[in-house]
Every structure is written in C-alpha cells, then in structure tokens.
Amino acid sequence: MKKSVLIIYTGGTIGMINDPETGALCPFNFEQIAQEVPEIKEFGFTIDSYTLPKIIDSSDVKPCLWEELCHIILKHYDDYCGFVVLHGTDTMAYSASALSFMLSNLTKPIVFTGSQLPIGTIRTDGKENLIAALEIAAAYIEDKAIVPEVCILFGDKLFRGNRTTKINAERFDAFQSTNYPPLAEIGIHIHYNYEAIDYSPRIAPISAFTQMDTHIAILKVFPGIRPEVMKAVINIPGLKGLILETYGAGNAPSNDQFLCLIREAIEKGIIIYNVTQCQGGAVEMGRYETSCELLNIGVTSGYDITTEAAVCKMMYLLGQGKDANEIKKRLNSALKGEITPNRVGF
Ligand code: ASP
C-alpha cells in the first residue's frame, strides 16, 4: 500500500490564533497549519487533511464527535495507512479512550495529538508533536503497522490512549500514563516499546460501535461528603452507571449512611464502577475494611483504569444494552488494554 496519512483536524490550541479584536484564543482554519509546518511536505508520503465542518475547543466535545471521527476513519480506512487526529488537550484522553472502545479490529495507527502553545507561536510544541505523530502514523514493518492502536502522542512519548490522563495545564509533557508504559519514546530516534503494543490478532474487518449511552455520572468521594449530595446523584432520573472515585486502593467512608445509599443505588439497578482518585496504582477492594463492604454490596472494581477510560467504557457497554451481569463482567476485564486485572492478584 502506498504510504499516506490523513490528518483530521477537530480544533484545539494546536490550530488557534489570537483574535485580533478580543485577544482571546480562537480556532482557525486548518489550511494555516499546513502553512505553519512546511516540513510536513518533506515526508516521503502523501499527507491529506480533513477539517471538521465545525472545529471546536475540546471542552465542547460530545460523543457525537467520537461518532463523527469513527465514520471518517471507516470511510477512509482503505485509503490511508494511518490517521492523525488533531484535538484539544483538555478532553483528548476521553476521545482517545472512546475511540479505542468504539473501533474494533483496528490494524492501523490512530494518533491523537495537539499542543500547549498554538502552532503559529515561536516556541510552539505543536510542530514537533505533529511531525512525530505523522511519522508514527506511517510507521510500518513489512506491511504491518508498528502501532495498530488508538494512542496519544505528546512531548517525547507515545501513550496508549485509554491509559492516558492530562496532568498539567502548562507543561509540554502534559500527559501521563502512570499504570502502563509508553508505547514509544521520541528522541533522536523513535524507540518503540514492542512489548507494550497490542499485537493481538484482529480477526474481522474494522468496525465501529457508536451508540454511546451517556446516562452516567461521576461521584468523587471526599471527607465530609453529605448524604444529600449522594442522594441527588443516585436519584438522577435514568441514571444507569456511576463512576465512584474512591480513595487509594478503592476505599470509601465505612459509615452506614454512605453504604446504605450505595446499596440503594445498586438495588435501583445502577452499576457502580470503583475507580481510584490516585494517579497510579489500582483499586483492590477487600484489602482494607473500608472497601470490603463495597465489594459485598456489589460494587465493580475498576482496577487501575483512568477515570477518562472508565467514563467511555461505561458509555460503550451501556450502549450495547447488555444485562447488568454481562456489563459488570466486561467492566472487570480488559477490552482494549485499558486495565490490568491481574495486577493485584485478583
Ligand atoms: N482548551 C483547549 C482544548 O482542549 C486546550 C488545548 O487545546 O490544549 O481545546
């Protein structure tokens, strides 16, 4: 296959300029990115670009953007050997996680990238990010993509998309994947971490599932959380899934009132997914007394999943309309390498 990469521009800082009137950052047309990085023309492969009809700051991302991206990728899948998605950093980890679940049997790289400084500014990190992303999207060995995954390229690292979190609003190394090693490190050469890349067999042609179900909520526990806060969340009409962000290894207040409300939610049919507030490590319900009861009540362990991946995994599984037991089983297993279920000996 002739090497070619499609850049899909969704918006974000990488393509922003200062509005001459207000001075605020606002999005501009992708054409200017090609002008700003003439180096990309020097790659020995074809680079096409597609700008979404409505470019957005990624704070405005909704699941319909993920659906749109899936459709574009599927439509052009045979025409390109890889895809680079230019996306704002704020919700990039959500979008990359979502696509990792929505796309099945992916054999080509989908590399999300963006930047902290607009590409037109002198110290921009956007140029290097874009150039490295393009190189990785086109990296093949004997007709096989080196990274057939949805990933995030930022600074000097390539991460698995559904393992990544934005951890800094200013630094060029804005993303982190604490619980999974980088898929590649970018220096003078690009060093691929072949052991970490998912080469499991893809048995069917690529397909996309796009019916994400957004009837979910996140509840972060904190000392002093009031019962009325919990009641308000669990009584949200139509709520089907709750990401419970707990302390440390999955611990939560052990008082009766808290536990009764969690039990009540489960009895109402709400699936509760226990995710740690910590940057690294995993939920291990049963390790401390304060998590034993959550396990007994029927809370599902998120192990070492990120909140971003948990949100997208829940929407994806609820969207498939499976019964609660099947959903819990899948929440407990790695669908796309997003958790390490054996990490803590379960
Ligand atoms: N607010 C911007 C966005 O996420 C920030 C960025 O692009 O990095 O779209």
Image: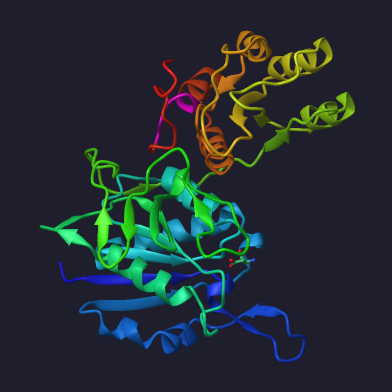
- Specify the quadrant of the image occupied by residue 311: top right
- Residue 239 in the image, given as x and y percentages of width and height: 71, 32
State the residue lying farthest toward the left.
142
Q: Can residue 307 be seen in this view?
A: yes
Residue at the image point whose x is 51% and y is 78% from the top: 124
Q: Is 179 one of the magenta-colored residues? A: no
In the image, residue 70 above or below residue 281: below
Bounds of the magenta segment? 330-335
Query: Number of marks in the image?
Result: 0
Look at 54% across and 83% down and name the residue there: 29
Q: In this view, does 45 lie to the left or right of 62?
A: left
Q: Is 34 left or right of 122, judged from the image as shown?
A: left
Residue 255: which quarter of the image? top right
Furthest residue toward front: 188
Q: In which quarter of the image is ligand 1?
A: bottom right
Q: Name which quarter of the figure residue 339 lies in.
A: top left
Work out which quarter of the rendered image holds the C terminus and state it: top left
Task: Tell me what residue is drawn at x 45 percent, y 64 percent.
Answer: 113
**Which image quarter holds the N terminus?**
bottom left
Classify residue 215 as left or right of residue 74: right
Q: Is residue 168 left or right of residue 253?
A: left
Whether residue 53 is visible to the viewer of this picture, yes or no, is no
Render colour scheme: rainbow
Residue 159: give x, y in percent of width and height. 40, 51
Q: Residue at x 39, y 77 (%)?
A: 49
Query: Where in the figure is residue 24, as x and y percent of width and height?
Result: 72, 80
Q: Is residue 258 above or below residue 158?
A: above
Check the image and report above or below for 296 versus 154.
Answer: above
